[in-house]
Amino acid sequence: MPQDTTSLFVKELNQGKPDLFVTSGHATEKDLQLGYAYRNGVFRNESDGCPYGSDLTGRTHTVSSPNPKIYMPIGNCLIEHLGGPDSMAAAFMKSSAVRQMMGNVEVTWYGYMGCGCLDYFVEQPGRYSFNQAFFANHHARIHRLETCFTGSNDTEPSPRKIRSTVLAQKLRLGRQDLKGLLFDRDIVAFYGDPAWQGRMAEGKTNWIQKLSKNKNSFVFTVTPTNGPNSFKPHYQRSPDRL
């Protein structure tokens, strides 16, 4: 693999026609840096919101990728902060047919929302659409806050009233985790039409779930298929508005 992968990245977007692409590393509202701890190219945008890759020699490679896709910049800082038409998020949605994306509007450091959404969407292939995976992971984070740090998710939380629970101790979660969970709750955004259905092809999943209705009650049955590594908590979209 060459050190400068700019042209390969652009070629894959243009010719590979990916349905999903995932990135991590350094970024700002105005650029996406392909290298993290080493020198590599960078993605920027023209003033009209068209993205291009700029390699280490200064040569530019235009992105022309009109097929619909999902973008998950799960580890990139600031990339979803919209600062104008030349912002990375705006450019990818306008000129590169990104129909849905999620990411950070500030400098990220904890990563529950990004990596967690990847788990629900990619590691449970076909179970959730992308917006459902985002929604499920959001609720998993709220569940962790409310079961591990009581009082932390109140409308007006008081630091003096927040208590670490036995579950938090069992999971070895401390004050830094509390800070990270609250941070991710407030700085991760979802862009795109939530009604647009984008999902992975069906594959092996960590559990089987079934929601059945009997008159005015529902029964939600979960059968783990991967032992203790099956994900918790589980999420099932109700067919009716409750």
Image (tube, rainbow, N blue to C red):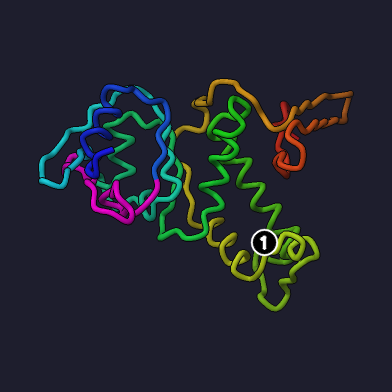
Q: Quadrant of residue 16?
A: top left
Residue at image location 53% in from the left, 25% down from the top: 200
Relative to residue 182, is residue 151 drawn left or right?
right
Q: Vertical placement of 135 versus 147: above or below?
A: above
Residue at image location 36% in from the left, 50% down from the top: 79
User: What amino acid is at disc 1?
Assistant: Asn
Where is residue 43? Give x, y as percent.
Answer: 24, 44
Q: Quadrant of residue 132?
A: top right
* Magenta stretch: includes residue 34: yes
Give the residue furthest to the front. Answer: 1
Relative to residue 193, is residue 172 drawn left or right?
right
**Image quarter in which the C terminus is found:** top right
Where is residue 116? Give x, y as percent.
Answer: 57, 45
Where is residue 127? Give x, y as percent.
Answer: 63, 27
| Residue receiving disc 1 | 153
Where is residue 170? Give x, y as percent.
Answer: 77, 61
* Magenta stretch: includes residue 118: no
Residue at image location 61% in from the left, 47% down from the top: 138
Residue at image location 39% in from the left, 55% down from the top: 77
Range drawn in magenta: 24-48
Q: Which secondary structure type mostly characterizes the magenta part of the structure?
A: loop
Q: Nearer the viewer, residue 76 or 135?
A: 76
